[in-house]
Structure formats: structure tokens, C-alpha cells
Amino acid sequence: MTIVLWGVPLLGVTIPAVNGEMLGFFIMLPLSLFLLWFWFRTGYKIEDEIIMVRYGPIKMKVPINNIQMIKKRKNPFTAPALSTDKLELVSGRFDVISVSPEDQEEFIKQILEINNEIKLDSRLKIRK
């Protein structure tokens, strides 16, 4: 994700600037800033039994009491996460969101304090 979210904006702005294509530069600049918005504004916060998810301009709320299962996933194409090492929160038959908190174990512990009925993927090792 780092290559995409940094490489595309940098190349998209640098190449037209070096070639003197100012129109291309000014077209790519807002698009580049938009991609970098995802890098700088991705995060997860637990507030009042709800996980607040922010992914660039996108904001979501996941009620912890609705989460049925937490799975470990490695997929570069699911969002809102900046890492391929993700947690998949399943809260219904079709409601799934992937997140990649820096400290996955602590994140899971906080969630389980609110809802200890959540099933955990066997690949998740949580120390008590």
C-alpha cells in the first residue's frame, strides 16, 4: 500500500513537473493529494461500544455488540487498511470490514472487554 499511496502521487506530480507539462501537473496535484489523504487519515478508535473507522474521507461506525467474529486476513485489496496484515470484523452475513490497527492484540482485547461473545479466528493468538 505504501508504494501505491506514495509512489503514484509522487510520480504523478513529478513527471509532468520535470517535463514542463504544467497542465498535467495541475491535474495530477489534487488527485495526488486525494490519495495521500488516505495515508494520513486512516485510523480506528473505540468509543462507547463503537469502533470509529476513518479511511481518508470515508467514516464508518461498527457497533462492537454486532460483531460476531474476528478473522486474521492477509489481503492487499480490502479496505480500510494500510497493511496486508488485517483483522476482518464480521458483523452479519454480508457486513464485513477489514482493519489494520498497529497493535492488533490490544485492539482485540479492548473489543472483547465490551463483547466477549465474539468468536476469534484460530490464527489469532491473544494473551490473557
Image (cartoon, rainbow, N blue to C red):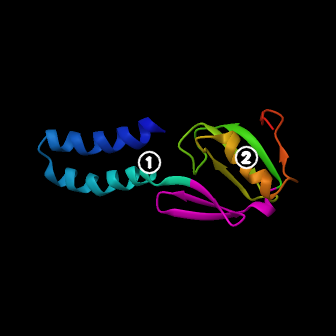
Q: How many marks?
A: 2
Task: Find the residue positioned furthest to the right.
Answer: 117
Which part of the image, by quadrant, shows the C terminus? top right
Q: Which residue is mark 1?
A: 39
Q: Which residue is mark 2?
A: 108
Q: Which residue is more in the foreground, 37 or 124?
A: 124
Residue type, label 2? Ile
Q: Is residue 25 left or right of residue 81?
A: left
**What percent of the width, then of the height, locates residue 78?**
61, 46
Q: Which residue is more in the foreground, 110 or 55?
A: 110
Q: Residue at x 14, y 51 (%)?
A: 22
Mark pair 2, 1: CA separation = 23 Å
User: Could you tell me if the residues under marks 2 and 1 are in contact, i.e. CB atoms within 8 Å?
Assistant: no
Magenta region includes residue 94: no
Question: Magenta-highlighted stretch: main secondary structure?
Answer: strand
Bin the neighbour count of mark 2 within 10 Å (Cα to Cα): few under 14, some 14-19, many 20 and up.
Answer: some
Q: Residue at x 47, y 62 (%)?
A: 57
Magenta region includes residue 60: yes
SS class, disc 1: helix
Residue type, label 1? Trp
Q: Residue at x 59, y 36 (%)?
A: 84
Q: Earlier in the sequence, mark 2 or mark 1?
A: 1
**What percent of the width, then of the height, locates residue 37?**
40, 54
Q: Residue at x 30, y 57 (%)?
A: 30
| In this view, the mark in front (2 or 1) | 2
**What percent of the width, then of the height, locates residue 124?**
77, 35
Residue 68, compared with residue 73, is above or below; it is: below
Q: For the magenta stretch, what is the residue range?
A: 44-67
Q: Which residue is more in the foreground, 88 or 43?
A: 43
